[in-house]
């Protein structure tokens, strides 16, 4: 009976946007803040999963790779072109890790698109994304009802450079615990900023992200 119930949840698209398990669906404070190296999650954070502090919904408050070098990887963009993290060196880059299969990613999509448009006005900042399955066991569900990531973009009427992580290997390498996740990468390829979805961050979500990014850049330059 339990197996049938879980299968029904998955078929309805309600499976959590985490790497493992179902969302807890709890109330209380939501992990929608921007974190930099050294920032401390609230004392109310859930530590029961043993990886990173989370809110009641399952979203991580922080990212274990903050302050560390971004693991190097290569891949193929949705356009078919090759990608390497080497091209990020020397510039600031915001990377969104997301998946069409994830309802939180779909809900965040228009805000990610708006963020990419705003950041495009800054010649010193790039925006890229990584489309990934939930894990290696669910690669066949990654695109939901779409033929490709490009088909999703075509339907929405916008696009930005997106690495297609076919087998969740990049997700595993980067230790992504939730989709959507936003990582801020410094010119020396260290991870200097992290947050989860934008949707629940209020009406000034894009302006706040840009302000947080500016503060991160200023603090990093001052080191």
Image: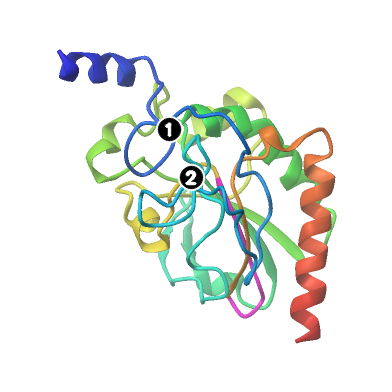
Q: Which residue is drawn at 42% across and 24% down?
A: 146
- Residue 98 in the image: x percent, y percent? 50, 42
Q: In this view, does 1 lie above or below 44?
A: above
Q: Where is residue 210 in the image (x, y as percent from the top left)?
A: 81, 54
Q: Mark 1 points at which residue?
A: 148
Judge from the rendering whether residue 95 lies leftward or rightward of residue 131; answer left or right. Answer: right
Instruction: Identify the residue at the far front of this view.
Output: 43
Q: In which quarter of the image is residue 204?
A: top right
Can the viewer see residue 123 in this picture? no
Specify whether residue 1 is painted magenta: no
Above or below, 215 against 8 in this view is below
**Quadrant containing the N terminus in the rendered view:** top left
Q: What stretch is highlighted in magenta?
A: 181-189
Which residue is disc 2 drawn over? 78
Instruction: Tell which of 79 and 53 is nearer to you.
Output: 53
Question: Which quadrant, please, contains the C terminus?
Answer: bottom right
Callout 2 secondary element: loop
- Badge 1 vs badge 2, beta-carbon distance below 8 Å: yes
Residue at 59% across, 23% down: 155
Q: Is residue 184 magenta?
A: yes
Q: Which residue shows up at 82% across the image and 33% down it?
A: 203
Residue 214 — which label?
none
Secondary structure at badge 1 equals loop
């Amino acid at each position: 009976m339990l197996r049938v119930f879980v299968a029904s949840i998955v078929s309805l698209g309600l499976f959590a946007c985490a790497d493992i398990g179902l969302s807890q669906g709890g109330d209380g404070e939501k992990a929608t803040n921007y974190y930099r190296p050294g920032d401390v999650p609230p004392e109310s954070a859930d530590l029961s999963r043993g990886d990173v502090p989370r809110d009641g919904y399952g979203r991580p408050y922080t990212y274990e790779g903050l302050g560390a070098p971004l693991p190097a990887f290569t891949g193929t963009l949705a356009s078919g072109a090759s990608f390497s993290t080497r091209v990020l060196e020397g510039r600031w880059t915001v990377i969104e890790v997301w998946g069409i299969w994830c309802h939180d990613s779909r809900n965040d999509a228009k805000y990610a698109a708006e963020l990419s448009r705003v950041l495009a006005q800054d010649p010193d900042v790039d925006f890229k994304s990584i489309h990934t399955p939930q894990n290696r066991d669910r690669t066949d569900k990654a695109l939901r009802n779409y033929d490709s990531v490009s088909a999703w973009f075509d339907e929405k009427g916008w696009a930005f450079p997106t690495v297609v992580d076919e087998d969740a290997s990049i997700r595993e390498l980067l230790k992504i615990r939730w989709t959507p996740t936003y990582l801020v990468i410094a010119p020396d390829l260290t991870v200097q900023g992290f947050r989860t979805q934008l949707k629940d961050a209020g009406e000034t979500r894009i302006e706040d992200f840009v302000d947080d990014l500016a503060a991160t850049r200023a603090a990093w330059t001052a080191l």
